[in-house]
Image (cartoon, rainbow, N blue to C red):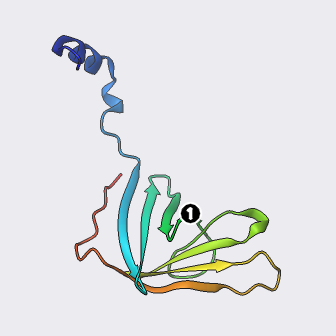
């Protein structure tokens, strides 16, 4: 533990412009999806960049928001290059997780649909 005077010196050395500048809004929601648990951490930066980190089964997958899709509900896609991609869709208070294989003729396979917030509490979100 720092002596009180050292802590005061360190605090004084930090410019006030750095103090408590939140740049990312974050929410964490646990969904119940056909008996499975899916945890989604959603982050939105002040710049508008959005991503989710989805934890399900034994996987943790980061996905970025697709833009310009024309869809009213946000779609987040993992970037696996030629290996295919996971997709998370928010649908109001529910969500869905799917997989799209790398093949040109691949169809999207729904892994979990109609996922519902299982916390029973209002969503908590920090604001930037």
> In the visual, does 112 lie left or right of 33?
right
Q: Residue at x 45, y 58 (%)?
A: 44
Most distant residue in the front direction: 58
Q: Residue at x 38, y 57 (%)?
A: 26
> In the visual, does 100 lie left or right of 37?
right
Most distant residue in the right direction: 104
> In the visual, does 121 lie left or right of 46?
left
Residue 39 occupies quadrant: bottom left
> In the visual, does 15 lie left or right of 77?
left
Residue 37 occupies quadrant: bottom left
Q: Position of residue 2 (x, y in %)?
A: 23, 17
Q: Position of residue 65 (x, y in %)?
A: 57, 66
Residue 70 occupies quadrant: bottom right
Residue 102 vs 43, above or below: the answer is below
Label 1, secondary structure: give it.
strand
Image mark count: 1
Residue 32 vs 30, above or below: the answer is below
Q: Which corner quadrant holds the N terminus?
A: top left
Q: Position of residue 16 (x, y in %)?
A: 30, 27
Q: Which residue is mark 1?
A: 61
Q: Residue at x 24, y 72 (%)?
A: 122
């Amino acid at each position: 533990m720092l002596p009180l005077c050292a802590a005061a010196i360190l605090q004084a050395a930090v410019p006030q412009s750095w103090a408590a500048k939140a740049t990312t809004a974050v929410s964490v929601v646990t969904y119940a999806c056909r008996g499975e648990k899916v945890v989604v951490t959603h982050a939105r930066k002040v710049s508008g960049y959005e991503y989710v980190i989805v934890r399900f089964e034994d996987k943790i997958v980061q996905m970025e928001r697709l833009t310009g899709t024309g869809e009213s509900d946000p779609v987040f896609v993992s970037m696996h290059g030629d290996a295919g991609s996971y997709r998370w869709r928010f649908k109001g208070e529910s969500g869905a997780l799917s997989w799209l294989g790398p093949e040109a003729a691949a169809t999207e396979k729904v892994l979990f649909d109609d996922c519902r917030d299982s916390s029973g509490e209002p969503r908590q979100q920090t604001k930037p």
